[in-house]
Each structure stands twice: as structure tokens, then as C-alpha cells.
Image (tube, rainbow, N blue to C red):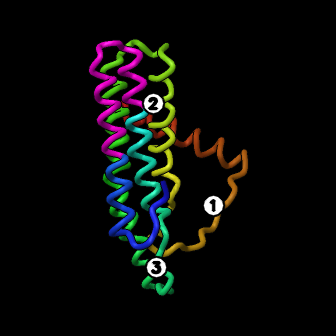
Amino acid sequence: MRITQPLKTSLPKKQKALDDVMARYAKTAGEGVPEWRHASSFRTGQALAAFGEALERSDKPADLQGDDRLAYEEVLREKAQPFYDRAEQVWTDMLRQAGSEKSDPWVERAQSSLWQRLAGRFYFRPEVDYPRIAGTPPEPVSLKEDKQVKKDSAVAQRKDEN
């Protein structure tokens, strides 16, 4: 289900669908079967992340241009972030509870999805707040001069010890 304009009508429908899916997964997780609980947790995280993505990709008002459109997209990103955070928290909780049950394919999928989301945070490279200046390499030291410096250093150290 795509989120379209006007958001006042399409967003509640999408939210209701998300709530229904989450309720069904919660019921399945409560059955007491570890594999079902893991599958439900993984799918719950997927549903939350998908809702955030759908919100970010939702139709933008046609009359928005330039900075107004960028500001609108920023607001959508801010509104989507809590859904991403909840998805990551669901997967993190599942991984903590699973402990050594890493052989379960649902646990592996949750770990993979979580790591991909976390890695995506570090892709951005911020601009530096300090000026960059060109440096000059140090003067090369000849091998003969280097040996003399080491010899002088060793002699000075022996004098200090005495």
C-alpha cells in the first residue's frame, strides 16, 4: 500500500495496516515456539522499517519546489526515523534474547538486517569545520646522518646513566 496525497487519508490507512500486521505477529510470537517468535520479531522489524521507507517515499505535494520541497522531505525523514529506531530495537532485543541460537535463520536474518541499517548510518561524510592546508613533506635524512644521530643519542643516554 503506497502513501499518497493527501496524507490525511492515506497515512491512517497505512498505519492501520501496520497495526494489524504487528498485532498478528505479536500473537504468533506469543505461541511459545522459538522459531515462530524469531520469525515474528524479524517480520515486525521489517514491517516497521518498511513503514518508515514508505513514509519517506510518499508522494510529495506537486506545488512544492526548491527549499520548500527539501524542507518537506526533511520533515518526512524525521517522521520516519522513529519507525527505523523501533525496527532496530526489535531486532536488537531478539538478538539479545536469542543468545547462542545463532543457527536459527531468522536470527541470522535479523542480525544481517540490523547490521545493514547500522552501517548505513556511517556512510555519510560530514563537511569539516576546520580549514585544510597543504603540508610539505619532511626533508629526507641520509643514511649516514641517521646513523650519526642514533650514535649521538646512544652516547648521550650512556652519559645520563652514569
Label 2, secondary structure: give it. helix
The mark that comes first in sequence, 2 or 3, is 3
The amino acid at mark 2 is Ala
Residue 10 vs residue 104, the one in the foreground: 10
Quarter holding the C terminus? top left
Which of the 4 image quadrants contains residue 94? top left
Q: CA distance from mark 1 to mark 2?
A: 50 Å
Q: Is residue 31 left or right of residue 160?
A: left
Residue at the image position 41 percent from the left and 51 percent from the top: 51
Which of the 4 image quadrants contains residue 88? top left
Residue highlighted by disc 2: 110
Residue at the image position 44 percent from the left and 39 percent from the top: 46
Highlighted magenta segment, given as a residue range:
18-42
Which of the 4 image quadrants contains residue 146? top right
Q: Considering only vertical position in the picture, is 2 above or below 143?
A: below
Q: Which mark is residue 138?
A: 1
Residue at the image position 38 percent from the left and 45 percent from the top: 48
Q: Which mark is residue 3?
A: none
Farthest residue in the right direction? Answer: 143
Single out the mark in the foreground, 1 or 2.
2
Q: CA distance from mark 2 to mark 3?
A: 35 Å
Q: Is residue 35 magenta?
A: yes
The amino acid at mark 1 is Pro
Q: Main secondary structure of the magenta part?
A: helix
The amino acid at mark 3 is Pro
Q: Is residue 27 left or right of residue 138?
A: left
Residue highlighted by disc 3: 61
Residue at the image position 44 percent from the left and 43 percent from the top: 118
